[in-house]
Amino acid sequence: MTDVDKEVRVRFAPSPTGYFHVGGARTALYNWLFARQHGGKLILRIEDTDTERSDSSWTEGILKALEWLHIDIDEGPYFQSQRKDLYLAAAEKLFLSGHAYACDCTRDDIENRKKEDSKPGYDNYCRERGLVPGEGRALRFRVPDTGVTIVNDLVRGEVEFANVSIEDFVLVKSNGDPLFVLAVVVDDQDMDITHIIRAEEHLPTTPKALLLWKALSNKRLPVFAHLPVLVNEKRQKLSKRRDRVAVEDYREMGILPEAMFNYLTVLGWAPKDGSEIFQPEKALAEFDLGQVNHSPAFFDEKRLLFFNGQYIRSLADEDFMARGVPYLGKAYPGLGNEEIMRVFMPLASVTKERVATLAECVDLLSFLFDDPFSPDQDDYQKLVKESDFAGELIKDFLDRFKKALYQDDENSFPDSEKGVDIESIKAILVECADALGIKLAKAQAPIRVSVLGKRAGLPLFEALEVLGPKKVMARLENALADLAKNAK
RNA sequence: GGCCCCAUCGUCUAGAGGCCAAGGACACCACCCUCUCAAGGUGGAGGCACGGGUUCGAAUCCCGUUGGGGCUGCCA
């Protein structure tokens, strides 16, 4: 078998030093697409060689986020913290072969000499001192003084680095811990990685990796693909510390994983036909690293919200409801799912075309569950209290509503849940509006605010029907009493 | 400062020398639909950073400038 026939093996290698943000998710996604396209393997490797900043809880978050996005991994997770011996063995090999040398320079030493020299980076002071590796001594790689190192990149073509511009970088810290450059190359060779797909920020370290790779073995070089970074509104690389773009946060606000997946896919790549909302199958069929954009992309939440709205609306009512229920359950811990679903289901279709996220269901349906109930103060003030017809209208509506409900038998209504149907409620309000000589749009406002609590929301008649006559009447009577009290 | 990457509407993009007086989508504005709000429909405003080349012809190729970004750590 020739090298060319080798199975595609890619890796996603996050470092667990903070919450998992959307930039990492996109890198993982592109790796996944590439692996699946080529019938290859996706390996997950946790780069936790920085013991100071790494934490297993972050690893947990990465795992959960990948699962949520349906990015399934074939191997791993491997933990670099558990493979230290491998890196140290490679370090020894490099020292023995003369590719690396021990260095006892402190940071200050280097700084001081730099003042005289004015050249940045390490000055190769220890290169020919013949120090033996040991306590308090770092191990540095001997970078060639001449020649160039060329990075073969699927996204950017060939990128050339003059070796003189690369300093003798550290492979092993003076405390004996291996550094990521070493660990990454050792692992990529050990795990037979064929394609390294990662963010562009790694491009400057790639020539180092290549030099190391060749010094370590004669394995075929991996092919690189450096993806443009994701930036914030200020065009800076997304940072875990600065930018609030955790995958977990989007999940909590009710972004659908398929919407996130789709949005991430088209952030930096577009299918030939220009379509933007599509199933993963299409990306699998058409995705091409060579077509990935070269420039940084802004993670536009507004656009994500649009994608999410599209996905929500394409859901079957039952599915939509099932996904929304947990959000309501969280907002109203006292309620059982059954209880929520009973009123959610009949309103599912009118709700799903009014939300961009699942969390927004809570806001739209709160009138069903709030207990005690109280309307939005601003809306109530403006559309009920300050209205010159609200009192009259509400009274009229309430009278007619009761009449329809009791149906000529005032005693037949104890607490019947039968209620009044949508068409009848509408007919009643039309009559009220006509009596006042105003339009239906105007007439619905006081009723809406008094019963549903806000000036905007679900279609009034559907909402009233599902709410049920008891609460409708109680809230209208409350409004009436309040208006009467105020009139004095 | 040094090295490297990048540059099409505000944003994400289509564009691989003539099909481009630059197309689509988000956001924005207007109108239609309409019980509110949405959703949906129709329309509108809005861009090839600049300067040189190459070419019969450049958003597309080359050079420079400017601008932005990344890296420059015994972080990843």
Image: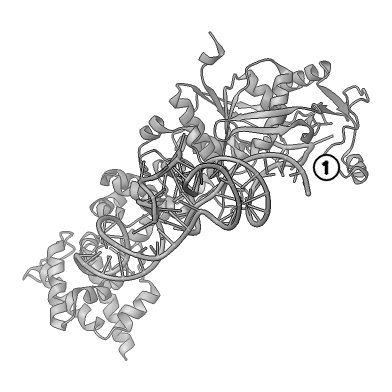
**Coordinates of residue A35 in the picture (x, y in percent):** 48, 26
| Viewer-proximal residue among A207 and A391 | A207
Name, please, the residue furthest toward the top.
A1
The residue at the point 61 percent across, 39 percent down is A200
**Coordinates of residue B63 in the picture (x, y in percent):** 65, 44
In the image: residue A255, left or right of residue A340: right
Position of the C terminus of chain A, as image quadrant, is bottom left
Task: Name the image quarter holding residue A419.
Answer: bottom left
The residue at the point 48 percent across, 36 percent down is A291
| Viewer-proximal residue among A411 and A222 | A222
Name, please, the residue furthest toward the bottom.
A488
Callout 1: residue from which chain? A
**Coordinates of residue A159 in the picture (x, y in percent):** 64, 33
**Coordinates of residue A214 in the picture (x, y in percent):** 71, 20
Whether residue A411 is visible: no
Provide the residue designation for mark 1. Answer: A120
In the image: residue A273, left or right of residue A297: left
Q: Is residue A436 above or below residue A327?
A: below
Whether residue A422 is visible: yes
Helix, strand or loop status at disc 1 = loop
Answer few, some or many: residues within 10 Å of disc 1's Cα (few below 14, many 20 plus, some between 14 and 19). few
Q: Amino acid at mark 1?
A: Pro
| Viewer-proximal residue among A10 and A297 | A297
Task: Name the image quarter holding residue A410.
Answer: bottom left
User: Which colouring convention does the figure follow?
Assistant: one colour
The residue at the point 70 percent across, 30 percent down is A207
The residue at the point 26 percent across, 47 percent down is A317
Q: Is residue A158 above or below residue A93?
A: below
